[in-house]
Image: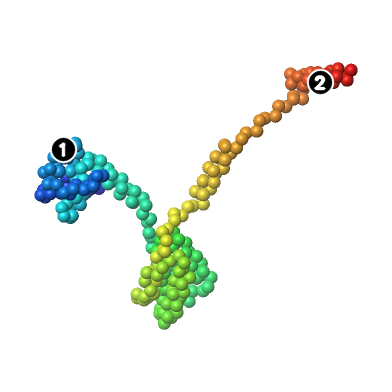
Amino acid sequence: MKNDNLKNQYRINEQIRVREVRIVGDQGSSVVPTRDALNMAREQGVDLVEISPNANPPVCRLIDYSKFLYQQKKRQKEMKAKQVKVEVKEIRFGPQTDEHDYQFKLKHAKEFLEEGNKVRAYVFFRGRSILFKEQGEVLLLRFANDLEEVGKVESMPSLEGKKMFLYLAPKKAGTKKVSQQARDREAAVAEAKKAQQAPKAEPETEIPANGGLFANAKISADALKKLTESEEES
């Protein structure tokens, strides 16, 4: 279905029924009658593709239509991959939230904003606690001030029913959060590569305890050395 929508988005060849078109390419652009543009496309073995129908005259390209659709599909995938999925994370307070709970939620809100997510903080007024709405507003303003390095206020505190909301957006694009398991896996791979690249030590030749060829060779070498030394002294 998506491919069909993309395919029907552009008019090609005889579907283009305007009097003249602007042909764009690597060599620049030129306005020519549509009939001449179609003849050029046939001579080059390509298609006349209308890429900007609202221009005056419409802008077209001489290109293989299948190749053009492939390029468009590839570009859409690249743009989608670059997009960071933004979520709205909620932080809930009571009108009389203690300092420990406040710092705990402040820490989480900072992490959310650093990851590129929006934050919707609100104070919930239960029963008669609505009388402390000014206290809730002060709390939310403090919250926004404490997060000013990583977040910007999108909407000032406003009361909606029994809840007072504050909306914050990240100042910078978020970075993907990597799990501890993924970090451990990357560290293990790096350690394995390091071990493979390290030079291997040559194994030492051990002389068997019960003698054998290596022991005899060593004794013969010692005897030859002593014989040479005695000849030199004499």
Number of marks in the rendered image? 2
Q: Is residue 13 above or below residue 214?
A: below
Mark 2, Cα crowd under 10 Å, few <14 / some 14-19 / many 20+, is: few
Residue 130 vertical position relative to residue 9 in the rendered view, above or below: below
Q: Earlier in the sequence, mark 1 or mark 2?
A: 1
Question: Where is mark 1, residue-wise?
Answer: 42
Name the amino acid type tagged 1. Answer: Arg
Front position in the image: 190 or 103? 190
Q: Quadrant of residue 175?
A: bottom left
Where's residue 116, x and y in %?
A: 41, 60
Task: Depth check: give the residue in front, 177 or 197.
Answer: 197
Q: Which mark is residue 225?
A: 2
- Which residue, as the protein is rendered here, is positioned at the far right? 234
* Relative to 30, 217 lies left or right: right
Q: Residue furthest bottom?
A: 131
Residue 140 seen by the camera = yes
The kind of secondary structure element at disc 1 is helix
- Identify which amino acid the numbered label 2 is placed on: Lys
